[in-house]
Amino acid sequence: MQNEAALAGTLAAAAARLALPPGAALRFAAVDDADGTLPAQLRGAAPRRQRGFLAGRRAAALALGAGGTVGIGADGLPGWPAGWIGSITHTDDIAAAVVAPAPAAAIIGIDLERIVAPALADELADLIAPEGLPAANPRDVELTCAFSAKEALYKALFPRTRQFREFTAALFRRAADGSPQLTLAEDWGEGWTAGTALGAQQVVAAGHVLTVVWR
Ligand SMILES: CC(C)(COP(=O)(O)OP(=O)(O)OC[C@H]1O[C@@H](n2cnc3c(N)ncnc32)[C@H](O)[C@@H]1OP(=O)(O)O)[C@@H](O)C(=O)NCCC(=O)NCCS
């Protein structure tokens, strides 16, 4: 496996291709390097979870710049500084965070996934994408793209709607130019109605899929 710093660098170079809201920033942090002060909720957590949390906060602080810090709310969600929205994701190795000035985006969600093994993709396909997977890429890549896009969508909308949604609540498709698209298959609340279409900003690099969904 590549070391985490090299992986972060490869993913950052790929992420530069994503179209983000004006004023947005996306940064990575290696999980192994993570340190800092844990909030009370995380003090009894497994060391890996603690490092993932801290790496996510480090990525968020880098994205905010100028000493920006991100707390944790009573609901477990990140507490963004006034005037900003954002989202955090982590794998075992790498954390990433995206932030945007609140006027530039109403919602934003990020997700980073390692591409799943082909056998697991076959096992999960009906659960994650019962609408069927596009054939643009091998099934393991497409399944991971669909999964990551739907998780990023959920993470973008949940802070607004506060409603859980299953993987059937949105459809993953590819537009004629191959770009990933999400369509809400049911009402998500707060005016996010069935039929709403959102583009997913997505890159596949270094065995991972990175997705940002924003509007
Ligand atoms: C919440 C969920 C999306 C997190 O995804 P994950 O791949 O396990 O974890 P990630 O590393 O990408 O993201 C975790 C981070 O997301 C944030 N987060 C957690 N729950 C969240 C929520 N409900 N909404 C927005 N952000 C959330 C936190 O910052 C968390 O990291 P932290 O606790 O260290 O701060 C996932 O656990 C889940 O519940 N999925 C089912 C719902 C879903 O995706 N439906 C699809 C609808 S089409």
Image: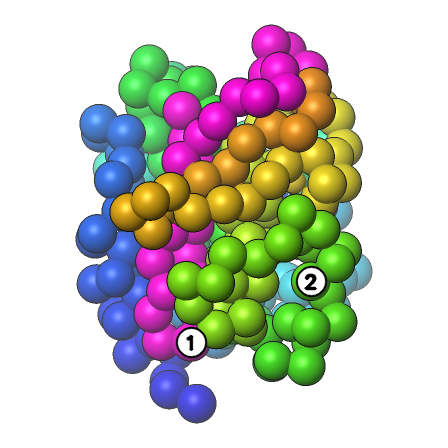
Location of residue 198 in the rendering, given as x and y in whole percent from the top left corner: 45, 30
The answer to whether the residue bearing label 2 lies less than 8 angstroms from the nearest atom of ligand 1 is no
- Reading the image, the residue beneath label 1 is 207
Real-space CA distance between mark 1 and mark 2, rounded to the nearest whole angstrom: 19 Å
Residue type, numbered disc 2:
Ala
Q: Quadrant of residue 199?
A: top left
- Vertical comparison of 107 with 175: above or below: above
Q: Residue at x 48, y 63 (%)?
A: 135
140 over 172 or under it: above or below:
below
Q: Is residue 30 left or right of residue 74?
A: left
Decide if residue 116 is on the left or right side of residue 43.
left
Q: Nearer the viewer, residue 2 or 197?
A: 197
Element at label 1: loop
Magenta stretch holds residue 187: no
Quarter of the figure with residue 128: bottom right
Instruction: Give the SS element for disc 2.
Output: helix
Residue that appears at 63% across and 54% down: 132
Which residue lies most toward the bottom here?
Answer: 1
Q: Is residue 112 above or below residue 158?
A: below
Image location (x, y in percent) of residue 137: 43, 68
Callout 1, which amino acid?
Gly
- Nearest the viewer among 26 and 76 is 26
Look at the image and tell me whether residue 85 can be seen.
no
Q: Which residues are magenta?
A: 189-215
x and y percentages locating residue 44 in the rendered image: 78, 60
- Residue drawn 26% across the image and 70% down it: 9
Q: Which residue is mark 2?
A: 125
Q: Is residue 11 visible?
A: yes
Viewport quadrant of the N terminus: bottom left
